[in-house]
Image (tube, helix red, strand yellow):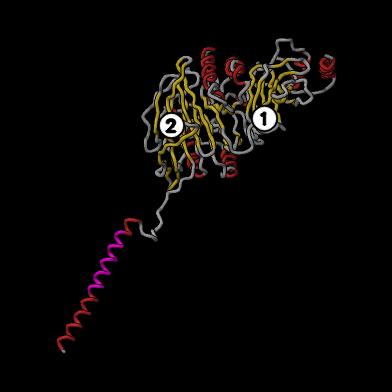
Amino acid sequence: MKKTKNKLENASILLLLCSFLPISLSNEEQLILARATQLPDSNDVPSMMAMTLLSDPSTSMGFNWNTINYTDSDLQIVKESIGDFASNDTLEFIGETSVSKVNGDGFIHSVKASGLEPNTDYIFRLGDKELDLWAETGSFTTSKTSNSKTHFIHVSDPQGDELEDYQAYTSTLSSALSNGDIDFVALTGDIVNNSWAGHQPILEQWDWALTEQWNLLKDYPVMPVSGNHDAADNDFISRFTLDTPSGAATESGAYYSLDYNGIHFICLNTNDTQSESPGTGLSDEQYDWLIQDLENSKNAEWIIVTMHKGIFDAGGHCSNTDGEDYDIAHLREQLAPVFTTYGVDLVLQGHDHLYSRTYPTIASYLDGQYIYEIDANYQMAETIYDNDTYDVMTNVSGTIYLNSGSSSGSKFYEPVVYDESIIHIEQAGNPSSRMYTDIIVDGNILLCQTYVLNGDEQSLYASFGIDKTVVEDVIPEPETTPTSNQWIIVTIVLCSVCAVVVAAVLFIIFGRKRKLNKKR
């Protein structure tokens, strides 16, 4: 504990100097110094832990946690095949410790691990090495560097006011993560139920949403976006370590992108809009970043967008554009044509707590009007994947927009009457059950299967797929040689012609002979 003692002594000396000398410290610096003079006890272990995907998941991973007292931000990672943090091969990372901008939240710890090996299994622990205070050990596998199978789940809106809501969310995660080798969790917002956007966050709910889930999510990275209930000032970015663009605004959430096994994921912050009527879509900064990001990734085999506020679904939020959801119409006009232009395949949405899936939708802006149409070229077919047969779409040019319902079941929304000239829904419903979607992307195949849960029992509710395998229409070449039947016909015709010719020749010959005989 010698290092700890020195750290405390140095902090105390600095505090003493500040009291006698004209040294001006910010409130944050004073709080850090004050906290540093308090030695954390054995119960001051990390809480609100989260492991997140960074821009290159093949070589990096993000970690975030909270402590009440000031502690160091230490992360240890070692290959699972070694399995011993005392090994000389253990990688050690020291992150940033900052005072939370949320009152009463203590300290935020953020660490980015880099230099990892692709497609490798690791174990890790996070906490304070000097004090030997660690969260429960977790594990992860880095992604591959080439296109290969990716298996992840989509969950949304676990928000709730009671612990029981988050325990139901735990049950959903437990069922979803048991479906084979899951790589990560795509979480499309409203993680907590803070009273409303911009209000003081309720830390107890974050504890339920993160600490309560750590037993499961310590082995699965998350790829989160901010919902409107997560938009309290700097609240979302305090919970997750992400590779946000340099200088990007993060007060109401965050936006970022990453590549996973050849899939390009774009995670948007739909809180980053003009908050007062008449409202706008995404800020200019986020929109410009989106266009550049899509331009840079336009050759990706698959492009998937995740965002909280759905711009095409069968729920009330999506259609209530004259009320408090006026920003959704602006988001739709701003984003849908861009998604069509750059070939976005799938958009994972939240906000409306129901199942909703659109037809492949093509959006355009023509003669001053926004036009939203069903892709006229797509076709239905069957494909075999992993020895099972699936109904899939082929020749798809439009974008499919999917809502996977509520993962906690804290509340459900019924489908509403929507403008069918704008919103093209293929399937929608409210089974009044917790839901999640299991997604596989493997080569040219994308499969989405949505499940409902009643207690611990789950059943398939809806499914769809996209097959990008190139199957060109075979146009018969003009036949240069006759078929066997044609040979028969040709032979008969030729024989008939020959017979006629022979008969004509014989007629002429015999006719001449007769004339000669008469002359004689």
Which of the 4 image quarters holds residue 94? top right
Q: Position of residue 182 (x, y in %)?
A: 57, 26
Q: Residues within 10 Å of mark 1 (few under 14, many from 20)?
A: some
Q: Are marks 1 and 2 in contact (CB under 8 Å)?
A: no
Q: Main secondary structure of the magenta part?
A: helix
- In the image, is residue 497 part of the stretch drawn in magenta? yes
Packing grade of label 2 (10 A; few <14, some 14-19, many >=20) is many
The amino acid type found where label 2 is placed reads Arg
The amino acid beneath tag 1 is Thr
**SS at circle 1:** loop
Q: How far from the left and from the top, in percent, is residue 476?
A: 40, 54
Numbered label attached to residue 209: none
In the rendered image, which residue does mark 2 sit on?
Answer: 357
Q: Is residue 349 above or below residue 368?
A: above
Magenta segment, which residues?
488-503
Q: Is residue 191 visible?
A: yes
Is residue 19 among what the camera can see?
no
